[in-house]
Image: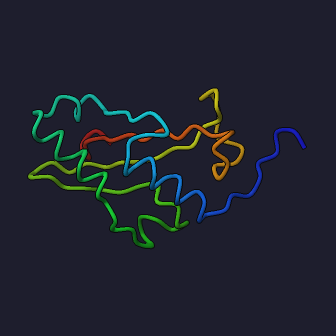
Amino acid sequence: MAGRVTPTEPTRVRTLNDALRRSFTGGPVMLTAGVAALPDNTRTAVLAAVRAFDHFDADDDPHGEHDFGAVTVGRQRCFWKIDCYDRSLTAASPDPADPTVTTRVLTITLAEEY
């Protein structure tokens, strides 16, 4: 049925989200103005912390999809979030478990910008 949102498989979604977060490939990685303005060494450390993040718990990851996290580097607290859009980036993905119909976007923001 056209336009119907299909159920997603959390394990597949988690695997695809982890792949984007760890490698920064498979979708755009967006930095907010605050993250982009950090000194180079701090920004590099924030990006490394996002890639290495593995502290998922029921409060931050209730659906087991590994789509959100928070990291602290020095005094900078940052959030990262993965959103799943359709291929045209105009609506939510009809099936985030299917990479042929999904574009994942990883956004990294300063906590104060959130």
The image position of residue 6, as x and y in percent, is 77, 52
The image position of residue 93, as x and y in percent, is 66, 41
Q: How is the image coloured?
A: rainbow
Q: Is residue 18 left or right of residue 5?
A: left
Residue nearer the viewer, 9 or 71: 9
User: Picture quarter containing residue 42?
Assistant: top left
User: Picture quarter containing residue 40?
Assistant: top left
Residue nearer the viewer, 103 or 100: 100
Position of the N terminus, as image quadrant, is top right
Position of the C terminus, as image quadrant, is top left
Q: Residue furthest bottom?
A: 58
Q: Residue furthest right?
A: 1
Number of on-image labels: 0
User: Picture quarter containing residue 25?
Assistant: top left
56 relative to 39, above or below:
below
Seen at 25% across and 56% down, the residue is 71
Seen at 74% across and 58% down, the residue is 7
Q: Is residue 77 left or right of residue 63?
A: left
The image position of residue 38, as x and y in percent, is 14, 34
Q: Is residue 59 left or right of residue 72?
A: right
Seen at 39% across and 68% down, the residue is 56
Q: Is residue 47 left or right of residue 90?
A: left
